[in-house]
């Protein structure tokens, strides 16, 4: 089974669900272990797609499956459990400014009921993996944008998610920092086997990071295939 599958997914917004079609009959399958990119302009439907995979939003019609499980079939409690199979990183990092880097990364484990000591040990390992082992006690405000995104990645991988969702994760970073974050995401994919689903408007991210790509326009997928086939060979 694919890591993520959307089958004929439509999402409408507006009174009675009729005003605006954010996703229009979208079908995609993200293979386990793939780095899959969705590229499109602002308003194309990328965030809506990622919110469906994260089970933050339900389709108006169609099926969303994560790890072979149809999200619509789950109870609230099961949905909460299913959300632990995914984790997300963000354009604006979404770190808590009032707690240390270490406690930002430990927080998902603390919320799972894991003790402070074990949570901090595992957070330390995750921060060492992303190259921030020497900044455990720093606060986010003391870090560069690239370092903040490394913290975001450490926090995202700490529960060993099957799928890492990246929502414009490099759009606030300069080109050389973007390349460093791309290298780190490749290392997460290679060393942990994490499937990565990226949404971005940046073609360089697709070309440098992704194996597979879907091109979105106005809520529809207009092209889909390997990055080689869609963007490099023609
Ligand atoms: P309905 O079809 O019942 O009117 P909608 O599809 O409009 O429902 O809304 C679904 C959810 O999206 C609701 O929680 C609603 O508050 C929210 N929502 C609707 N329109 C907007 C908007 N323009 N911006 C942000 N959220 C919205
Ligand atoms: P992208 O991430 O590619 O910029 P989005 O998924 O955010 O695209 O938006 C797709 C379309 O759906 C846009 O026209 C946007 O305004 C609309 N949209 C997104 N979320 C909502 C919402 N909650 N309520 C109403 N319209 C929305």
Image: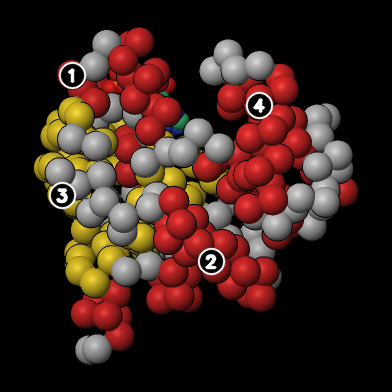
Residue bearing mark 3: 27
**Which label sits in the foreground, 1 or 3?**
1
Kindly report the distance in space between the C-alpha atoms of the residues bearing marks 1 and 3.
19 Å
Disc 2 residue crowd, few under 14, some 14–19, many 20+, Cα 10 Å: some
For marks 2 and 3, give the one nearer the viewer. 2
Q: Is mark 4 within 8 Å of ligand 2?
A: no
Q: In this view, does 37 lie to the left or right of 112?
A: left
Q: Gap in Å between the C-alphas at discs 4 and 2?
A: 26 Å
Query: Around disc 4, counting alpha carbons within 10 Å, would you say few (fewer than 14), some (14 to 19), or many (20 or more)?
Result: many
Q: Position of residue 181 (x, y in %)?
A: 59, 63
The residue at 75%/36% (across/down) is 102
The location of residue 91, given as percent across then percent down, is 59, 51
Foreground tag (4 vs 2)? 4
Q: Is residue 231 above or below residue 233?
A: above
Provide the residue designation for mark 1. Answer: 73
Please name which of the two marks, 4 or 3, marks the residue nearer to the observer: 4
For the residues labelled 4 and 3, say whether their Cβ atoms are less than 8 Å apart. Answer: no
Distance (Cα) linking label 2 and label 1: 35 Å
Where ligand 1 lies, by image quadrant?
top left
Instruction: Please name whichever residue, 17 or 160, is drawn nearer the observer in this view of the structure.
Output: 160
The quadrant the C terminus occupies is bottom left
Task: Kindly identify which numbered label has been placed on residue 157.
Answer: none
Q: Is residue 227 left or right of residue 222?
A: right
> Is disc 2 in contact with disc 1, using a CB cutoff of under 8 Å?
no
Question: Residue at position x 71%, y 40% from top?
Answer: 124
Distance of mark 4 from mark 1, alpha carbons?
32 Å
Tell me which numbered mark, 4 or 2, is placed earlier along the sequence. Answer: 4
Q: Which mark is residue 119?
A: 4
Specify the quadrant of the image occupied by residue 123.
top right
Residue at 20% in and 66% down: 224
Q: Where residue 204 sits: x, y (%)?
A: 47, 75
């Amino acid at each position: 089974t694919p890591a993520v599958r959307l089958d004929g997914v439509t999402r409408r917004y507006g009174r009675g669900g009729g005003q605006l079609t954010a996703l229009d009959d979208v079908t995609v399958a993200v293979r386990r272990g793939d780095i899959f990119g969705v590229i499109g302009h602002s308003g194309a439907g990328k965030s809506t797609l990622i919110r469906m995979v994260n089970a933050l939003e339900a389709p108006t019609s169609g099926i969303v499956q994560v790890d072979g499980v149809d999200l619509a079939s789950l109870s609230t409690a099961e949905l909460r459990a299913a959300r632990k199979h995914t984790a997300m990183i963000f354009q604006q990092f979404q770190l808590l400014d009032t707690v240390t880097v270490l406690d930002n990364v430990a927080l998902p484990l603390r919320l799972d009921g894991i003790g402070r000591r074990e949570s901090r040990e595992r957070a330390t390992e995750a921060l060492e993996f992303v190259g921030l082992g020497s900044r455990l006690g720093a606060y986010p405000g003391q870090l560069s944008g690239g370092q903040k995104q490394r913290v975001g990645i450490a926090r995202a991988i700490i529960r060993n998610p099957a799928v890492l969702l990246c929502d414009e994760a490099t759009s606030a970073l300069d080109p050389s920092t973007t390349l460093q974050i791309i290298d780190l995401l490749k290392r997460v994919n290679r060393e942990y086997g994490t499937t990565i689903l990226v949404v971005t408007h940046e073609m360089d991210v697709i070309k440098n990071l992704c194996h597979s790509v879907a091109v979105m326009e106005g809520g529809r997928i207009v092209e889909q295939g390997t990055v080689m086939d869609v963007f490099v060979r023609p």
